[in-house]
Amino acid sequence: KCVAAKQHRHFSFFDIELSPGTRISKLQRYSEELALAMRAHSSLIVKPFPSRGVVRLQTTNSDPHRINLSELFLRHKPTGFLPFLLGETDEGEPLVMDLAQNPHLLIGGGTGSGKSVLLHTMVANAARMNDVRLFLVDPKQVEFASYAKRLPGVVERVHTDPKSLLVTFNYLMSIMEMRYERMSQLGIQKVEDRPDLFDKIVLIVDEASDLMLSDFGKQFESFITKLAQKARAAGIYMILATQRPSANVFTGLIKANFPARLACKVSSVVDSKVILDKKGAEKLVGRGDAILSNSAYDMTRFQVAFPDTF
């Protein structure tokens, strides 16, 4: 029995109560048949809400409206130590991720999924803050190259060469150690205790697979792991993205230190499980349709905002 139905500018959903004995797995198994019967415009995502006693059948609208980042900022002022306004949830609410609470993020998504737009949206968020320094890694040399000139006060470095990136990793490690020494002298445990003391540093790596599968792959994994384990308290945060989310890119050691996961559309259930540890991302429709799973959002579907401010 359908107990609620709602439509936002990008998503539509139906909350249903199941008859006694009906299994959720049965709905999931026949989701494609349900989508056909409902004449849905995309695959259904079946998500239980135990606290409400309902199961949600969710799909996208046939003619969704683009969500502009500037519009979201007019309606919502994000709060937090390092807040990123990423888009709009399936409930029609602004989605804000405080990177300092996560503290590192893995992003996966195939070609046409909206992953690149998401990364530009994150850069646009950082540009609105006064105390953030960005280190950008762009092995393909097409995503971040222009930011060095466009955002000289925000973007510290843009790397396209793996060898030069190793130098930056060493530099970030030295900053981390110096900050820990300074915090020890002041008797504080993390930068949030003295937000005026240090700038926040965010390292964004696009196409991490190119680095992990290169000749320097083991060195990159070692640096990433060391930074992930210790850098958060020193105000250094990492975002790793790839369009090839395989187990040899996002290794178990890396995933253990990256509690926040974000998936745009991927090609298979296997890829979805590599990123989210759950299936679901393979049923997204692309063009910024995404799922965030972290301490604040449990497998929350949202639409990535378009960074029209750039």
Image: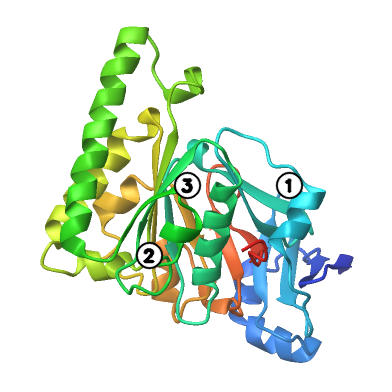
Element type at mark 1: loop
Tag nearer the camera, 1 or 2:
2
Q: Neighbour class for label 3 at 10 Å: few (<14), some, many (≥20)? A: many
Left or right: residue 44 versus residue 54 is left
Q: Which residue was labeled with disc 1? A: 51
| Dot label at residue 206 | 2
Q: Earlier in the sequence, mark 3 or mark 2?
A: 3
Q: Which residue is nearer to you in this view: 154 or 82?
A: 154
Dots 1, 2 in contact, CB < 8 A: no
Q: How many marks?
A: 3
Query: Which quadrant would the C terminus be assigned to in this image?
Result: bottom right
Dot 3: what SS?
loop
Residue 17 versus residue 239: which sits nearer the camera? 239
Q: Which label is found at residue 154?
A: 3
Instruction: Looking at the image, tell me whether mark 3 or mark 1 is earlier in sequence order.
Output: 1
Return the residue nearer the eye: 114 or 163.
Answer: 163
Lower position in the chain sequence, tag 1 or tag 2: 1
Residue 175 lies left or right of residue 198; in this view the side is left
